[in-house]
Image: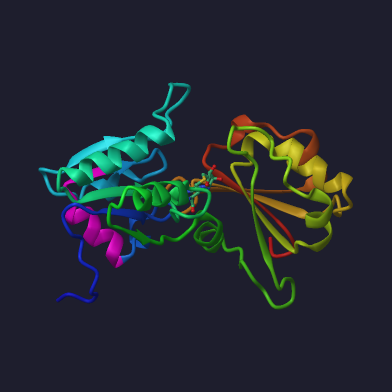
Amino acid sequence: MQLFQSKFNKGSVWLVGAGPGDPGLLTLLAFESIKKADVIFYDALLNDHILSVAKPSAELIFVGKRGNKKSINQLEINKLLINEAKKNKRVLRLKGGDPFIFGRGGEEALSLKLNKIPYKIVPGATAGIAGLAYAGIPATHRDFNTSITFISAYGAGGEKPETIDWASFSKTSQLIVIYMGLERMKWVCNELIKRGRDKNENIAIISNATNKNQKILIGNLENFSKDFDQSTIDSPALLVIGKNV
Ligand code: SAH
């Protein structure tokens, strides 16, 4: 039974979000596309089980970052997607979470569009929503928040982003979810406290959200701004700050 109309045509590229880890969170479109793809370009954050549904003849190509090894750069990935589509293959670009949330999907889509390659974006469950659910933290709760803020602690070149307006966020963001923040924990906590956030406010670290090795640590901004030992928890991890925690 075909539940949906989208068809993964030869010569096209699908940019697909695979969710944060648990294969059960794949969408039907994501599942179909993994089964049908001729070539799959995948990232480091992907749960290995997810790739096991690919057909035996599919080429699986890792294009993520691993350890300190030099990783393939974004322009090269864009070029690979275009070249493989021109060979009339079904090309799958499979990403952790949602492709358009801190996932460079926008850059890839733009490059495909400029090169007149047909493409489709398939959204996925982003870690900042699904990960909270698996940790038992409601992303919204009527008693606590009417908004959520997603922040990336890394800028495009790996720097601490200057565009984060900590003063406004401290004041107005009821629930703050920070991606790529683990290595910058002390900086994040100190900025928030410095700009007026209550130092006793709870912060949760959700590591490997939705995976079997998911781990949750809860503290407050003051504690984690001082003596946070990063070796006690693994990447990838989200930081969640707010009363909902
Ligand atoms: N596109 C992805 C985010 C990529 S940025 C998404 O929508 O979820 C990478 C960051 O996402 C990590 O540093 C971490 O902060 C977060 N992340 C991704 N998967 C995660 C997981 N399973 N558990 C905790 N954090 C995760």
Which of the image's four quarters has the N terminus?
bottom left
Residue 91 located within the stretch drawn in magenta? no
**Which range of residues does the magenta coloring cover?**
28-40
| Extreme residue toward the top, this view | 69
Q: Is residue 88 above or below residue 26?
A: above
Figure coloring: rainbow
Q: Position of residue 4 (x, y in %)?
A: 24, 75
Left or right, 57 with reference to 175: left
Q: Is residue 137 above or below residue 177?
A: below
Q: How many marks?
A: 0
Q: Residue sitting at 79 percent across and 47 percent down?
A: 221
Q: Is residue 212 visible?
A: yes
Question: Would you say the magenta stretch is mainly helix, strand or loop?
Answer: helix
Left or right, 108 with reference to 227: left
* Residue nearer the viewer, 174 or 131: 174
Q: Residue sitting at 69 percent across and 40 percent down?
A: 161
* Residue nearer the viewer, 24 or 105: 105
